[in-house]
Image (cartoon, grey):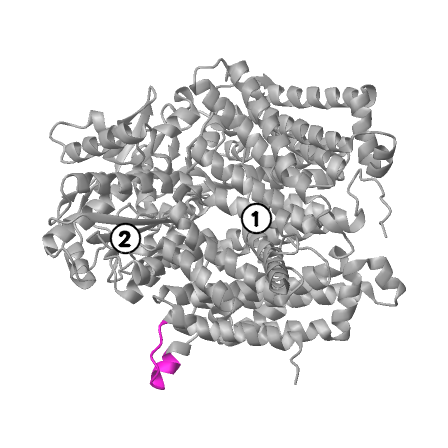
């Protein structure tokens, strides 16, 4: 029983990161129909930026803030320089652009920072906490509560604020949104900035647990993409459920079945799910445009 | 007599392959040439899938892996010659593509992307983890095709680079010829119809699932043959050949050069295979330049390099 | 017309990459500076550049400057083979150093043997030098020897039931395989065998299973990069108190920093003199070599040394020594090969190398030092 609890703690910690990654995919997809494979690079930049901010003498919160702001700015630049100019390009071209961006950011990070593996101490110490025979690092609580905070804040933003509602409207129907006077280009820019900031925030929280290096982005992006697809691309609730589900499934597979094939289970599940529910768990049924 | 475009394409390809060695300053260029042709074979298959049929795959390196490991394992465990191992790999890839293609190809866009991505990752994971069969992440030796020995017995001494240059070049021409013929066939017309729109194609009475499946299976066979040749040339194969980044490379080559035409895609394979060799001068900026090339071509040459260059060239000639 | 232009353009691009013809002794290298094995290949590449710089500043060897032609193969054997071909056929190097991973080393050695160019590998796999191939040598201990060294110590401490958790990358998978094979020789039984993927964030489930294995007496973690540090943190988080062994893949200060000194306390590793440079006995034969390399590396790059850089250091040292003994500033690769094979008593950072026609590694188990982490530094364990 305590084993199960232990596996769940692991799964929830990793799952919370996946959920934030999937959320980043979702926000950008909703605003622009783009799946952004550079999403993992934002997480890397959040972590690496904080590492080097601390090394430059900044206090941790300031270093983290600087890393998040810098990454958000990069997200906006990515949209302006690479995504907007390719408006209307086929899916495969957009995939190549965002993967190209990921390779570019990774290359730049190896030059700007270095090729070493880095971490900084957890925010509330490193002593493990004990619950019901299982242990948990305080930083895991930071990750989980940080993710929860983001999801609640976004929920409020989307349902209460005018800009948030405009983003929702744009994701439902971009043409209609434009017709009622919503600046959809601004929404797109905003969504890239927001996604990048969320990714960097995840990176800031998780680096004490997972460590970071210039080349961790692509692997994170694949996991986040898988989580987003599992939940159903384009749905923030789906991103949350997909992320947590993926994290827990990986941990349970590693614990009970085979640690060698734990990553496989995620993809087997996705393929099976897509066979039976082609829109993911929470996907909306879009009519095919003819 | 007027040549058809497909004959011109084949002729251009043939002349390029035959003439290029005249300009080679060292034997190393044969190696790069052979690599280009081997990639171009897989890319030609993707032209049929992406360019003709409008479907996407982020997992075709998985089929490359199946072809490659067939040539490593079948001669040892089944006692068949490497040549038959190529055929076996192609048959396995075709079979797998046929089985998973049916449900997968109902999906569209990113959903098809993630399903094929998952398929490719699963294949590469099996290749890396089943070490008792595959040799694990460090790879496994591949038996000799025996062709060089045969040629030597006949009195021809060729280097490995030269042999594979001509061999891969010949296979590429054959593959391109098949792909170009397919383009003009009823199947090719059906595929191009469903590239535009599934629904439109369906209303025209085209059996959409069947034709998509055909394109998927054919492209899997091309990828598998490409993997087999790569394994036999390198005499060593590792799970990297089946990895996600190799899938991305193949798709990028296809789209970068010009997804609609076989010649364009082969041009893309040439650029992207040769690029790392050129980028060594940039040392640590290599990845930045590669990423930038991918982005810029997609933005400024959405039809791909070759069609855009040709258009510009014709435009200038017209003035 | 068009085709010719394209062809000419392509060739011009290659021309850019051609080397200047002034340098006299050309040494080639293909390393994984980036990619999954970048943590290993990066210090190796830095070390080679540093050494060539130093040698040339001191007037070169045999009165000639050395030119290093170094390519980044990203750890992909297909690229490594292409670059090896380029080094031999295009750049005209006299010898090749490289192959950060066993896979890339196997790819390079195929070219080296075919073209009869000496190749010194910096990867661990035993298959690189077993069977012995005429032109292929290597500097690191094999992972087979690392397993032996670890199990030897376990046997001494009376440990017989061991849990293993290894990475699924080439390094982890190869060493896991060797350890499984050799465990029986030391009366050791592997009672738990868990795996993790290189990018994994959390190994608690695997370690929970290992912890729950009945009669467990010690845990071994073959791997490199961030994996071992995360395993070490998770190990302490779960409160496992059993003796904990890491492989030579972690041998650097960064492992201690990433794990946290208090978490890494007591971890044992088969390592090299490089990590205990300051604490070597005054009469230790490796002392001068190790300190000189460490000071130069840290002074130049401002980051701690790792054993992987040390492997590259030794490869270059062996090669330079052989070129000097051969005495020809424009050596014939076959003569150079003979000179390398005649290397005897050459002191490197990893150990003292003596090659022969039946041994192209030239190290024995005694060159491995059993290290333990105490108070955040590596300390050599006194052995009876």
User: Quick one: A211 or C302, which is closer to the camera?
Assistant: C302
User: Quick one: A46 or B99, which is closer to the camera?
Assistant: A46
Q: Residues within 10 Å of mark 1 (few under 14, many from 20)?
A: many
Q: CA distance from mark 2 to mark 1?
A: 30 Å
Q: Looking at the rendering, which quadrant does residue C334 occupy?
A: bottom left
Chain of the residue where label 2 is placed in the rendered structure? C
Labels 2 and 1 within one chain = no
Find disc 1 in the rendering and name its residue: B294
Find disc 2 in the rendering and name its residue: C20
Q: Looking at the rendering, which quadrant does residue A234 occupy?
A: top right
Q: Which mark is residue A56?
A: none
Is there any visible trace of residue C66 in the rendered image?
yes
The answer to whether C302 appears left or right of C13 in the picture is left
x, y percent for residue B116:
67, 53
Q: Secondary structure at mark 1?
A: helix
| The residue positioned farthest toward the front in the image shown | B319
Is there any visible trace of residue B235 in the rendered image?
no
x, y percent for residue A223:
62, 39
Which corner quadrant holds the C terminus of chain C?
top left
x, y percent for residue C276:
25, 29
x, y percent for residue B310:
61, 62
Residue at image position (56%, 17%) is A129
Q: Magenta residues, as a range?
A: B149-159
Q: Is residue B61 above or below residue A284?
A: below
Chain of the residue where label 1 is placed in the rendered structure? B
Number of residue marks: 2
Q: Is residue A166 above or below residue B164?
A: above
Q: Looking at the rendering, which quadrant does residue C206 occupy?
A: top right
Q: Nearer the viewer, mark 2 or mark 1?
A: 2
């Amino acid at each position: 029983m305590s084993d199960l609890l232990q596996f769940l703690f692991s799964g929830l910690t990793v799952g919370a990161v996946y959920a934030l990654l999937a959320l980043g995919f979702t926000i950008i997809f909703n605003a622009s129909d783009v799946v952004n494979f550079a999403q993992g690079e934002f997480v890397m930049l959040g972590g690496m930026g904080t590492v080097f901010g601390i090394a430059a003498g900044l206090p941790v919160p300031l270093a983290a803030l600087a890393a998040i702001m810098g990454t958000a700015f990069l997200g906006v630049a990515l949209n302006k320089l690479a995504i907007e100019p390719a408006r209307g390009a086929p899916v495969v071209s957009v995939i190549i652009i965002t993967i190209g961006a990921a390779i570019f950011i990774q290359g730049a990070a190896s030059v700007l920072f270095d090729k070493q593996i880095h971490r900084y101490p957890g925010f509330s110490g490193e002593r493990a906490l004990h619950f019901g025979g299982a242990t948990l690092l305080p930083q895991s609580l930071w990750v989980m509560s940080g993710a929860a905070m983001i999801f609640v804040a976004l929920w409020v933003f989307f349902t209460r604020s005018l800009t948030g509602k405009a983003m929702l409207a744009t994701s439902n129907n971009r043409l209609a949104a434009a017709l009622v006077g919503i600046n959809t280009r601004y929404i797109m820019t905003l969504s890239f900035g927001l996604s990048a900031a969320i990714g960097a925030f995840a990176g800031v929280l998780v680096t004490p647990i997972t460590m970071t290096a210039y080349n961790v982005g692509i692997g994170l992006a694949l996991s986040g993409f898988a989580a987003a697809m599992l939940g159903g691309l384009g749905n923030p609730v789906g991103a949350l459920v997909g992320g947590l589900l993926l994290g827990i499934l990986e941990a349970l597979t590693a614990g009970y079945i085979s640690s060698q094939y734990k990553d496989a289970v995620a993809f087997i599940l996705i393929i099976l799910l897509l066979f039976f529910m082609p829109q993911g768990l929470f996907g909306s049924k879009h009519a095919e445009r003819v | 007599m007027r040549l058809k475009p497909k004959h011109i394409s084949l002729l251009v390809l043939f002349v390029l392959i035959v003439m290029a060695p005249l300009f080679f300053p060292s034997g190393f260029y044969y190696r790069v040439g052979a690599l280009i042709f081997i990639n171009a074979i897989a890319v030609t298959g993707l032209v049929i899938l992406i360019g003709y049929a409008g479907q996407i795959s982020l997992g075709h390196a998985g089929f490359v892996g199946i072809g490659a490991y067939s040539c490593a394992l079948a001669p040892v465990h089944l006692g068949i010659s490497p040549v038959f191992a190529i055929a076996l790999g192609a048959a396995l890839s075709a079979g797998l593509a046929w089985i998973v293609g049916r449900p997968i190809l109902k999906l569209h866009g990113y959903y098809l992307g993630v399903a094929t991505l998952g398929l490719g990752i699963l294949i590469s994971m099996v290749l890396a983890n089943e070490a008792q069969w595959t040799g694990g992440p460090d790879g496994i030796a591949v038996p000799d095709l025996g062709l060089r020995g045969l040629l030597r017995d006949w009195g021809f001494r060729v280097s490995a680079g030269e042999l594979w240059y001509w061999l891969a070049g010949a296979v590429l021409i054959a593959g391109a010829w098949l792909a170009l013929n397919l383009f003009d066939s009823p199947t090719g017309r059906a595929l191009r119809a469903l590239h535009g729109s599934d629904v439109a194609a369906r209303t025209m009475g085209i059996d959409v699932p069947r034709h998509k499946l055909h394109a998927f299976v054919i492209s899997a066979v091309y990828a598998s043959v490409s993997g087999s040749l790569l394994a036999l040339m390198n005499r060593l194969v590792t799970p990297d050949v089946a990895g996600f980044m190799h899938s991305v490379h193949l798709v990028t080559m296809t789209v970068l050069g010009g997804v609609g035409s076989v010649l364009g895609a082969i041009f893309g394979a040439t650029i992207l295979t040769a690029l790392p060799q050129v980028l060594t001068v940039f040392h640590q900026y290599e990845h930045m330049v590669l990423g930038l090339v991918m982005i810029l071509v997609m933005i400024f040459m959405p039809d791909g390099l070759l069609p855009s260059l040709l258009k510009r060239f014709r435009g200038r000639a017209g003035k | 017309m068009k085709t010719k232009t394209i062809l000419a353009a392509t060739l011009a691009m290659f021309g850019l990459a051609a080397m200047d013809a002034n340098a006299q002794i050309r040494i080639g290298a293909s390393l994984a500076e980036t990619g999954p094995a970048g943590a290993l290949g990066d210090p190796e590449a830095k070390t080679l550049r540093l050494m060539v710089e130093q040698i040339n500043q001191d007037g070169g060897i045999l009165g000639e400057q050395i030119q290093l032609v170094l390519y980044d193969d990203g750890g992909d054997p297909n690229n490594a083979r292409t670059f090896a071909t380029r080094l031999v056929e295009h750049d005209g190097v006299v010898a090749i150093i490289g192959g950060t991973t066993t896979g890339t080393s196997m790819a390079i050695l195929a070219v080296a043997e075919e073209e009869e160019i000496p190749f010194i590998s910096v990867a661990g796999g035993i298959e690189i030098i077993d069977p012995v191939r005429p032109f292929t040598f290597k500097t690191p201990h094999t992972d087979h020897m690392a397993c032996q060294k670890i199990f030897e110590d376990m046997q001494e401490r009376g440990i017989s039931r061991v849990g293993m958790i290894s990475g699924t990358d080439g390094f982890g998978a190869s060493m896991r395989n060797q350890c499984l094979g050799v465990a029986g020789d030391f009366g050791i039984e592997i009672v738990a065998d868990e795996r993790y993927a290189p990018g994994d964030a959390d190994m608690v489930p695997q370690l929970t299973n290992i912890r729950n294995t009945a009669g467990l007496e010690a845990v071994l973690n073959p791997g490199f990069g961030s994996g071992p540090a995360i395993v070490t943190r998770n190990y302490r988080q779960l409160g496992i108190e059993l003796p904990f062994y890491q492989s030579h893949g972690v041998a650097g200060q960064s492992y201690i920093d990433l794990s946290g000194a208090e978490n890494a306390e007591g971890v044992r590793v088969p390592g090299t003199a490089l990590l205990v440079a300051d604490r070597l006995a005054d009469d230790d034969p490796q002392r001068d070599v190790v300190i000189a390399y460490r000071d130069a590396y840290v002074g130049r790059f401002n980051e701690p040394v790792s054993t992987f850089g040390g492997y590259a250091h030794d490869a270059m040292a062996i090669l330079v020594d052989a070129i000097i003994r051969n005495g020809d500033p424009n050596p014939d690769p076959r003569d150079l090969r003979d000179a390398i094979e005649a290397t005897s008593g050459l002191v490197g950072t990893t150990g003292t190398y003596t090659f022969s026609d039946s041994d192209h590694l030239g190290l024995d188990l005694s060159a491995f030092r059993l290290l333990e982490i105490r108070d955040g530094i590596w300390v050599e364990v006194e052995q009876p």
